[in-house]
Structure formats: structure tokens, C-alpha cells
Image: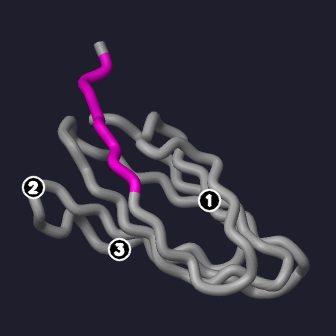
Amino acid sequence: MAIVNFEAFFRGGTFGFVQIRLLRNGHPYQNPIVINGTGHQQVDLEPGLYLIVVHGVAPPDGATIIIHHPSSPTTPDEFSEGPIHKNYVLTVTLQL
């Protein structure tokens, strides 16, 4: 198992949110992660390949999404005002 930290920073003092869904073998893995306003969530993941689907809304001054684990594409990722739609591939390996 590996602990993966997901962070979202919303700039400008305006409310923003993201929903992060994890898919493994084409099926949902755990419940979606929701970050309302700036914050972070940690998830303990089993080894394997994951598709990370991020949807949300960035406030007028934009947002930054960070996945604290190697992903493709890499993060941090910057978003301007408006909808956030992005997919990432995450490979979790055993930590020895």
C-alpha cells in the first residue's frame, strides 16, 4: 500500500471545488474524493495502475492541482477560471 496525497489550491478568495475519481481495472476504486476550497486528502492505494479523473470549477484567479505521487502528465497543474477537466495515469508500486 502507498499513501497518495491529492491537493487543490484555489486562488482569489473565491470558492472552488474538485471531485477526484479513481478507476482501477476500469472500475471505480473507493468513493470519490471531494475537495471544497483549498485543501488536501490522503488515500491509501494498493499497487497497480489507476486512472485519476478530476472534475471541478476554478475561481476567477485560477486553481492548482497537485498529486504527490508520480503521474502522467505530471503535476502541479494550473487551471484558469472555469471548468476543470483533466485525467492522469498513476502507477503505484510496492514500497520496500
| Label drawn at residue 29 | none
Q: Which residue is mark 3?
A: 32
Choose mark 1 or mark 3, whichever is in front: 1
Residue placed most toward the observer, 80 or 95: 80
Q: Secondary structure at mark 3?
A: loop
Q: Is residue 34 above or below residue 24?
A: below
Residue 41 in the image, given as x and y percentages of width and height:
52, 59
| Label drawn at residue 25 | 2
Where is the C terminus found, in terms of image quarters? Answer: top left
Q: Secondary structure at mark 2?
A: loop
- Tell me what residue is drawn at x 56 percent, y 77 percent: 84
Q: Sequence-wise, which precedes: disc 1 or disc 3? A: 3
What secondary structure is the magenta-colored segment mainly? strand
Asked if residue 70 lies left or right of residue 16, the reply is left
Q: Amino acid at mark 2?
A: Asn
Q: Sequence-wise, which precedes: disc 1 or disc 2? A: 2
Q: Sequence-wise, which precedes: disc 3 or disc 2? A: 2
Q: Amino acid at mark 1?
A: Ile
Look at the image and say whether residue 84 sits in the magenta stretch: no
Between the C-alphas of marks 3 and 2, the distance is 16 Å
Where is the N terminus found, in terms of image quarters? Answer: top left
Asked if residue 94 lies left or right of residue 34, the reply is left
Dot 2 alpha-carbon crowd within 10 angstroms: few under 14, some 14 to 19, many 20 or more: few
Q: Which residue is mark 1?
A: 65
Dot 3 alpha-carbon crowd within 10 angstroms: few under 14, some 14 to 19, many 20 or more: some
- Tell me what residue is drawn at x 18 percent, y 39 percent: 48
Magenta part of the protein: which range? 88-95
